[in-house]
Image (spheres, grey):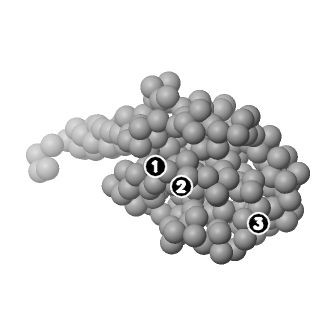
Amino acid sequence: MPGHRPQTRLLLTLVALATLIVGYYLGQYWQRQPLHDLSAVVYPDGSKLDYPTGSGLPAPNDGACCWRLFVSVDTRQSACENLLRHYTLVINRLAAYPQIQQNLRLTTLAFDTPSQASIEAFRAQRDWVEVISAEPKMLDALAQDLGIAPLTDNWCEPIEANAILVAPDRRRWALIPHEQAAIMAHNVRTVIEFVE
């Protein structure tokens, strides 16, 4: 800028830097969707969980792998197979967010203690489904800690099919109600984006 005084150049440079900084932070602010608009129940600061030894879930020193949606199931029930189909729609709705989709698991607590063959049949080659089969007392304790202990024998019916979203660091962040797949995917994505 020939002909401009050094003070003018300095002022223009500072204005340009301020505009970039303000734009960045406003973009971050608007990118995070407000949690009060969700139908999910978001827990403040996330509550820490301990997975029981022998549950098949990684120990704390094994490192963080993924976000998990925990649900209680009986793999013999057709309603639970329908629930997996519903979660397939939820996962598919996250295709526009590949980082979230790839790092999300549906972790089912199988209270019917299925065999390995039954587990594979239930998963039906869905690599994002984990089936935890363990001692009933262990599953009861974990389900109680998560807040998804089965209340009736209506396995996987909508009233019993709510999920708990847990972060890789084992913090329980939200109860995701069983709703339309698009709403559930929106709830999951918004909470994960807010926490991360």
Per the model, the C-alpha gap separating discs 2 and 1 is 9 Å
| Residue at image point 68% right, 36% down | 45
Q: Which residue is mark 2?
A: 81
Q: Is residue 32 visible?
A: no
Pinpoint residue 136: horizontal percent, then vertical percent.
Answer: 85, 54
Q: Nearer the viewer, mark 2 or mark 3?
A: 2
Q: Which mark is residue 112?
A: none
For label 1, the SS is helix
Q: For this view, does 10 lie left or right of residue 128?
A: left
Circle 2 SS class: helix
What residue is drawn where x is 60% and y is 44%?
Answer: 156
Q: Earlier in the sequence, mark 3 or mark 1?
A: 3
Towards the viewer: 142 or 159:
159
Amino acid type, mark 2: Glu
> Which secondary structure lies at badge 3?
loop
In the image, taking residue 84 as reference, residue 71 lies left or right, namely right
Q: Nearer the viewer, residue 179 or 16?
A: 179
Amino acid under disc 1: His
Using residue 20 as the reference point, say whether residue 91 is left or right of it: right
Task: Say which quarter of the image contains residue 15.
Answer: top left
Q: Earlier in the sequence, mark 2 or mark 3?
A: 3
The picture places residue 186, in percent across and down from the top left corner, at 42, 40
Q: Which label is found at residue 56? A: 3
- In the picture as drawn, the residue positioned furthest to the bottom comes out as 117
Local crowd size for mark 3, using a 10 Å CA cut-off: few (<14), some (14–19), many (≥20): few
The residue at which mark 1 appears reads as 86
How far, Cα to Cα, is label 3 from label 1?
24 Å
- What residue lies at 56% left-to-right and 66% top-to-bottom? 123
Q: Mark 1 packing: few (<14 Cα in 10 Å), some, or many (20+)?
A: some
Residue kind at label 3, given as amino acid type:
Gly
Question: Which of labels 3 and 1 is toward the front?
Answer: 1
Say whether marks 2 and 3 touch (CB < 8 Å).
no
